[in-house]
Amino acid sequence: MSTDPQSSPRRIGWVALPVVLFGTVALLFAVALQPGRDPTRLPSMFLGKPAPAYAFAPIEGLPAGQTINGFDQAAFSGGNVTILNFWASWCAPCVDEHPQLVTLKGTPGVTLAGVNVKDDPANARQFLNRYGNPFAELGADRNGRGSIEWGVYGTPETFILDGKGKIAYKHVGPITPSDLATRILPAIEAAKH
């Protein structure tokens, strides 16, 4: 019985292909999961650039006394540092980080703004009534288009903008007490200068 010389290399190639693909994927995971790499520090193409020109509509039905006007890019250029937080009532990590946002409320020289993402207005209102409304500016992103414009991967995400409306810092995931002390507050101070 004779063997075809061209079929053996082809057969070896087909057998080796899954092994090579697996090795490549394993290598990518190994690099991504190296000790010291922070998975919450996803790059943002907007760092150092002006905030995207997008207007967020108000959350419908908020009671009097709560911010109901929505906001746009102009809200970020009033001289104060702005903390912009993308959140949702259906987001469990948003509940976990909310006490840190309440702590930031009233920080001198800082405006806290919030964007409610892909949420029912009634659920957003219930969330704010239950946990408190730390936001001086508050808008809704019902269809998620504004989040896309800002390059948001998911909720919660937080941006820090300098007083001229340029994005100085991006935090992916919930803000923990440790993040507040070691990342957010230093980023606010850096954005003031």
Image (tube, helix red, strand yellow):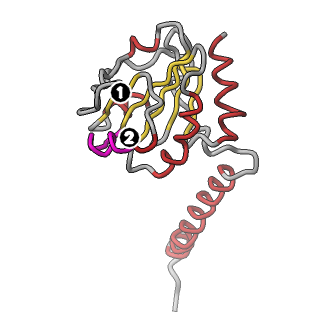
- Within 10 Å of disc 1 (Cα), the crowding (few <14, some 14-19, many 20+) is some
Mark sitting earlier along the chain (1/2)? 1
- 124 to the left or right of 184: left
Quadrant of the image occupied by residue 42:
top right
- 148 to the left or right of 94: left
User: Magenta stretch mostly in which secondary structure?
Assistant: helix
Q: Position of residue 113 (x, y in %)?
A: 45, 25
Q: Residue at x 49, y 24 (%)?
A: 112
Q: Residue at x 52, y 92 (%)?
A: 1
Q: Position of residue 167 (x, y in %)?
A: 53, 20
Residue at the farthest right position = 35
Q: Which mark is residue 66?
A: 1
Q: Residue 136: within the magenta?
A: no
Q: Position of residue 165 (x, y in %)?
A: 49, 13
Which region of the structure is painted magenta?
Answer: 117-128
> 132 or 188: which is nearer to us?
132
> 101 or 189: which is nearer to us?
101
Residue at the farthest bottom position = 1
Q: Residue 126: within the magenta?
A: yes
Quadrant of the image occupied by residue 81:
top right
Q: Position of residue 114 (x, y in %)?
A: 43, 30
Q: Amino acid at mark 1?
A: Gln
